[in-house]
Image (cartoon, rainbow, N blue to C red):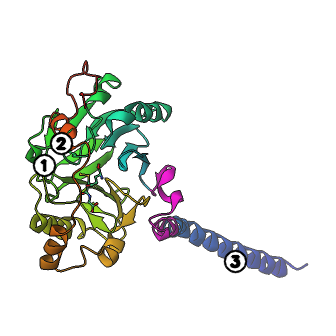
C-alpha cells in the first residue's frame, strides 16, 4: 500500500475515535441529568400514592435526601391514635399523643426499632383518655413531655405557634389550632408531608367545641387559616377516628369534610346541634392530663377511677 493510502486510513480511524470521544464526553455530561430524572420519578411516584396507601408510611419513607420512620398505633378502647416519628439516620424519635394504658406496647416497638425517644408530645389536654407522657418516664428516663403554653397544663417543656421541635435532623413545626380546647396544637413534618392535627381536624369531621374552653368560631378559623392552608398533598393524621379510617389529606378534607365545607355561620350552627354525650372518662382524664399524666417517674399508678 502506498504511504499516502496508509495515511488516509490512519486519519479516517483518528476521526472515528475523536467522534467516539465526543460522544463519550456528552454521555458523561448527561449522567447528572439522569440522576435528576430518576429522583423526580421517585418523588412523583411517592406523591402519587393515595394518602391511605399502606405502602406510603408503614415502612421507612425515603425521600431523595431525607428519610423518616413513621408508625401509627391505635388504642381500641378510646379510638385514639398515637404516632411515632423518627429520623432514620440518628434514630432520634418523638411520640405524639401516647395513651396511658398503651405505654408498654409503645416502648416495646421503640426498643425493637432501636429508636432514641426524645420527646412525648401532647396535641392538647385530652378529655377522653389519660396521656402516657408522664408514665413513659418510667421506661425512658430522659424523655421530656411537651404541651402548649396555652393549655396551662404542667409539662417539662411548653411550646407555642412557630416553635420547631428537633429530633435528629428532622423537625416538627408547631401550629396553634385552638377551638376544640384553647391549647390545641397541630404538628407538621414538611419532610414527611404530614400534619398531626390532634382533635382540631378529624377525618370528615372536627373536634367538639362544647367544653374545655371550646369555641366553634375559633376552631373554624384555626382549621381554615392554619391547617387547610397547607399543601393539598399533605397527609392528615388525626387524634381519633371512630369508624376505622386512618388518614386523609388536606386536599380531601377541603373537598369532602361536611362540616368544614360550610360557611362559618352554618358550621357554628352544626356544632351547636351535635348533641354528643360527654366522654366517659372526662372527670378523671382532664385533671390527670393537666399534669401531663403524672409528671414524676415514681408515679406509675393510674389515678383511681
Ligand atoms: N364517646 C367517647 C367520646 C367521643 C368524643 O366526644 N370525641 C371527641 C374527641 S375526644 S374529647 C370529639 O371531639 N368528637 C367529635 C365528634 O364529632 O365525634 C368517649 O366516651 O370517650
CA distance separating discs 3 and 2: 73 Å
Residue 295 - label: none
Residue assigned mark 2: 147
Tell me which residue sits at (13%, 49%) in the image: 160
Q: Is residue 25 above or below residue 305?
A: below
Q: Observer-nearest residue: 258 or 65? A: 258
Residue found 21% across the figure and 52% down from its top:
278
For the residues carrying marks 3 and 2, which lies nearer the camera in this image? Answer: 2
Number of numbered discs: 3
Residue under label 3, please give it.
15
The answer to which quarter of the image holds residue 259 is: bottom left
- Taking the spot 21% from the left edge, 64% from the top edge, the residue there is 275
What distance separates the C-alpha of mark 2 from that of mark 1? 9 Å
In this picture, is 265 found above or below 163? below
Ligand 1 lies in which image quarter?
A: bottom left
Quadrant holding the C terminus: top left
Q: Is residue 232 visible in this depiction of the protein?
A: no
Q: Secondary structure at mark 1?
A: loop
Q: What is the crowding at mark 3: few (fewer than 14 residues within 10 Å), some, or many (at least 20)?
A: few
Amino acid at each position: 500500500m502506498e504511504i499516502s493510502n496508509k495515511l488516509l486510513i490512519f486519519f479516517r480511524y483518528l476521526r472515528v475515535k475523536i467522534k467516539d470521544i465526543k460522544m463519550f464526553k456528552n454521555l458523561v455530561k448527561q449522567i447528572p441529568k439522569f440522576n435528576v430524572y430518576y429522583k423526580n420519578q421517585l418523588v412523583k411516584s411517592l406523591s402519587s400514592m393515595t394518602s391511605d396507601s399502606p405502602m406510603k408510611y408503614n415502612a421507612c419513607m425515603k425521600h431523595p435526601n431525607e428519610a423518616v420512620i413513621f408508625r401509627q398505633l391505635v388504642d381500641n378502647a378510646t379510638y385514639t391514635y398515637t404516632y411515632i416519628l423518627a429520623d432514620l439516620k440518628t434514630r432520634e424519635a418523638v411520640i405524639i399523643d401516647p395513651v396511658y394504658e398503651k405505654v408498654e406496647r409503645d416502648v416495646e416497638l421503640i426498643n425493637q426499632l432501636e429508636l432514641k425517644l426524645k420527646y412525648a408530645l401532647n396535641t392538647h389536654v385530652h378529655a377522653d383518655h389519660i396521656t402516657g407522657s408522664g408514665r413513659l418516664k418510667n421506661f425512658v428516663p430522659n424523655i421530656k413531655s411537651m404541651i402548649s403554653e396555652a393549655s396551662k397544663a404542667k409539662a417539662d417543656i411548653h411550646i407555642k405557634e412557630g416553635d420547631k421541635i428537633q429530633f435528629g435532623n428532622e423537625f416538627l413545626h408547631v401550629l396553634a389550632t385552638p377551638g376544640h380546647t384553647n391549647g390545641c396544637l397541630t404538628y407538621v413534618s414538611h419532610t414527611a408531608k404530614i400534619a398531626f392535627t390532634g382533635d382540631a381536624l378529624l377525618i370528615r369531621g372536627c373536634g367538639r367545641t362544647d367544653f374545655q374552653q371550646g369555641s366553634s368560631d375559633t376552631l373554624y378559623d384555626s382549621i381554615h387559616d392554619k391547617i387547610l392552608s397547607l399543601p393539598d398533598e399533605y397527609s392528615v393524621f388525626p387524634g381519633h377516628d371512630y369508624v376505622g379510617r386512618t388518614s386523609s389529606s388536606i386536599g380531601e378534607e377541603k373537598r369532602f369534610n361536611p362540616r368544614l365545607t360550610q360557611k362559618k355561620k352554618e358550621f357554628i350552627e352544626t356544632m351547636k346541634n351535635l348533641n354528643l354525650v360527654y366522654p366517659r372518662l372526662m372527670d378523671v382524664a382532664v385533671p390527670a392530663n393537666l399534669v401531663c399524666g403524672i409528671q414524676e417517674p415514681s408515679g406509675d399508678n393510674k389515678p383511681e377511677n
